[in-house]
Image (cartoon, rainbow, N blue to C red):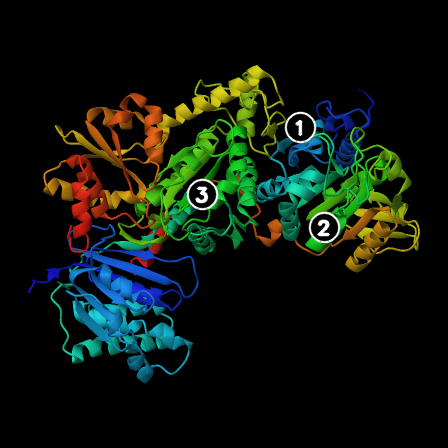
Amino acid sequence: METPAINDLSISIATENGTGSASANNIIFKAIFKMGIPCSSKNLFPSNIQGLPTWYQIRASAEGYMARKDVIDVMVAFNPATAAKDVHRVRDGGLILYDEPIPVANLKRDGVQYVGVPADQLIQKIVPASPLRIKQRNMIYVGALACLFGIDMETIKAVLQDTFGKKPAVIESNLICIEAGFNHVKENGVSQNIARLVAIPNGNKGKIITEGNTACALGAIYGGASFVSWYPITPSSSLAEAIEYYMPRLRKKDGKATYAIVQAEDEIAAASMLAGAGWAGARAMTSTSGPGLSLMNESIGLAYFAEVPCVFFFIQRGGPSTGLPTRTQQADIQLMYYASHGDTRHIILIPHDMKSCFDLARRSFDFAERFQTPVFVMTDLDLGMNLWSSEPLKLEKAPFDRGKLLTAEQLEQWEKQGKRFRRYFDYDGDAVPYRTIPGNPHRKAAYFTRGSGHDSDARYSEDEKDYQETLDRLRKKFETARKYVPKPIIEMQDGVKTGVICFGSSYEPVREARDRLKASGLKTNHLLLRALPLTEESREFLSAHDVVYLVEQNRDGQMASIFKDEWPELGAKIVSILIYDGLPVTTLEVVRQIRQHQNGDMKEVAEWQEKRRTASI
Amino acid sequence: MAGEKTNRINLREKDYEGAPSTMCRGCGHDAISASVIRAFFESSIDPRKVVKLSGIGCSSKTPAYFLSQSFGFNAVHGRMSAVATGANLANHSLIPIGVSGDGDTAAIGLGNFCHMMRRNVNITYIVENNGVYGLTKGQFSATADKGSVMKGGKVNDIPALDICELAIILGATYVARSFSGDRKQLAPLIQGALAHKGSAILDVISPCVTFNNHEGSTKSMKYVKEHLDPIHDVDFIPPYENIEVDYKEGTDQQVELHDGSRILLHKLGKSYDPTSRMQAMQAIHAAVAEGKFLTGLIYYDPNRPDFAEEMNLCETPLAELGQDILQPPAEMLDQINAELMK
């Protein structure tokens, strides 16, 4: 008999999409959080409204690791369609909490503990026949899990209060169902020895639970976003919707809006509106995902070439084409970096947690205005749509950087100094020109913006010298930006010759993987990349190590290509760790691939596959 | 020049000119630019309060050829409607004028054009309509009439898309058609559009002298001139002028615009009420059936608020708001953090 682990547990809940399981799952996760236990959740959902299978994975980790765990201790098998497979996802010695209508004949798996709950039977007694019954039957497993693992019922009540505060009847009806599940397990005397959840007083005190899309939305609002055009697309819609939700509360003046939000007719329009609004002087943004960015490409080129500030929040999903729209990827890095035809390169800001989502979203407008160009804030579905616990979002007090924006008064000064305003002239040697915006009343302020060839005075030009000068200046401007973008966060220990580079949502699994590798004797240094273009720090990091593992969530090593393009002489040091099954990265996968490379053969892989079901990280 | 006529803000008509045109000699588009210049001059509009927008094509080049003191944005093909929507919301105090062509508006940009009108974005939107792609040398556009013959002899067998009909269906609130060569009608219609708050669509037939001016074309100079069907003569009366001067009871109709100016419509045949959507649609269909170009103020809806008003925007343009307004207080973030702890 094993001793139950304390506060170390991974639960996977298999249900059918559209049955209201989201509420039930949310209650379990928030209750564990409220107990003060470090925890994370991953929603593995289909592109569907009703009927397809969906899984929700909760991890409680006494050590505070937030990555998805692919060793599952407990499977809640509440979807008959997937139950036969789901039972094999549990580790040996794990537990399967199943919906009793699922015939036991379908649950062919030895070495696990089965706990059945007759959800229909229980629910019939307490909820009258209604569409609500389907939804509330999920509350049965909430109660059963609470009883089995020690989730505190008082805490569950508090979560119900937080969730349905204004609807006491809803709280009551859900609570009855949760209690029914709880009592069923209790009355049958079921117990388990896998894990116990024990409240940690003040464990999560001061922490928030949010999604990257919400954190980005709040960051954008605090960054002064005044124009938002967007088109619904998973997984980015909830970012624009969070802006719609918070704006009326945060940004009204005398009852009037200090922002405009337009749900456009398509992404082509969204990006074009953005170009118009950025040109006219608003802090303009959109949010989109894979196919949306494909459509936006032409206007991105316009904004790049005409030097119009605008911000693109880009939440990656599985491609190509429609791909896996509800799964996570980092496979559009190059599509962003080189977006649009012709020679283009763009600034990309890369958050890795909730606080950096907020901070970089806020600062993105400064970068866009400083460099008068499209700026991308790159996240992915895992960061954007999963719930993450985090320190509270914090506003750093800093003045907006509007860049080289000339007012009428400044133009008047210029004129007195005998200086003529030339829109695309490089006055300061940093290749960043001065800008005026429409409405500037100075008679020398106006200029003609175009996506076609132009000279330093913004006049139409097909002259080969003008054209090449413009292209060269834009490249030089990108070099100026290189000095400004957020630097990577580096963890270095002398004498360590193995490095790991990662970015975005890979950060958590890599952090844990490095601890595991260290425990088994492999020390690594770490570089968390936070922006493109790459900066000198990344080059130095490559130089300082014999081998550098670059972890990214795509098939082709897109970020590695950008590194190799910058510093071909160091490229051979990079070993790509590629994870691209569409699910949030697991620690185990990072560890496995690094060990495989360290061992220099494939033996490890074979062993790992054999052990996969039973292994514990 | 001393003694040259100036308007109420002390500008001469030539102050509204732009760079020299690069259109073909005799192109209808240049005549439209001249009418645009006339309209702005006559209405005494400060060029610094104007933004010029366009897409791609011959017509879209023309904003460079008028109002050189105004900001201009020559965007990408078919996207002027969307670019203008963004620009208008970013600064609703400016007067937007857009110039586009029939390919830019009715083919590649049709979707965005439709949705701009659905939103009633404030803009004076001129379609320089010649039924043909000029810059790519002579392909049919979506407004080429069925049966019209291309320069090489190819016959168009798909019905034309009618810009005015489309505009009325989709919610534009000021819809007019005119002819590039008729400055007397076109200039006051542009003045009216500039005074109107909402999507003002002007479908201006503007023959392409290079690719669509031959026998068999239904958009040639000769054909168009022979088939014009004006509903009324048009006069624009600015807010400061006394209306009684020209108004003739019974034969004239006046249309009041948002800024207090008026359009006087002098009846030419049957009486026509431009505020009637049904009558407008009937008149368009009747003219198409007869192979004629119905011109004049075809439809007008004074009641619908424009998009910026619908959005309840604050009076200061969004582009001019400072950090004090744009950045909410930190205490509000603390409140939100507290909510996210639940």
Tag 3 residue: A224
- Residue at x 24%, y 69% (from the top left corner): A107
User: Would you say residue B261 is visible in this rendering?
Assistant: no
In three-dimensional space, the C-alpha distance between marks 3 and 2, rounded to whole angstroms, equals 35 Å
Q: Say which of marks 3 and 2 sits in front.
A: 2
- Mark 2 residue type: Ala
Task: Give the number of the mark in front: 2 or 1.
Answer: 2
The percent coordinates of residue A360 (x first, y second) are 36, 40
- Determine whether label 3 and label 2 are within 8 Å by CB: no
- Residue A556 seen by the camera: yes
Q: Chain of mark 3?
A: A
For mark 3, give the secondary structure.
loop
Residue sitting nearer the eye, B118 or A582 = A582
State which chain disc 2 sits on.
Answer: B
Q: Chain of mark 1?
A: B
Instruction: Identify the residue at image location x=32%, y=42%.
Output: A553
- Whether discs 3 and 2 lie on one chain: the answer is no
- The residue that mark 1 highlights is B69
In the image, residue A139 sits, relative to residue B337, either above or below, namely below
Task: Out of A342 and A355, give the one closest to the viewer.
Answer: A342
For the N terminus of chain A, give its image quadrant.
bottom left
Of the residues shown, which amino acid type is indicated by label 1? Gln
Find residue A375 and report its image quarter. Answer: top left
Looking at the rendered structure, the secondary structure element under dot 1 is loop
| Disc 2 packing (10 Å; few <14; some 14–19; many ≥20) | many
Disc 3 residue type (three-letter)? Gly
Which residue is painted at 92% across and 50% down in the image?
A: B248
Give residue A260's position: percent from left, percent from top: 53, 48
- Rounded to the nearest angstrom, the CA distance separating label 3 from label 1 is 30 Å
Residue B167 — which label? 2
| Numbered label attached to residue A198 | none
- In this picture, residue A153 sits left or right of residue B103: left
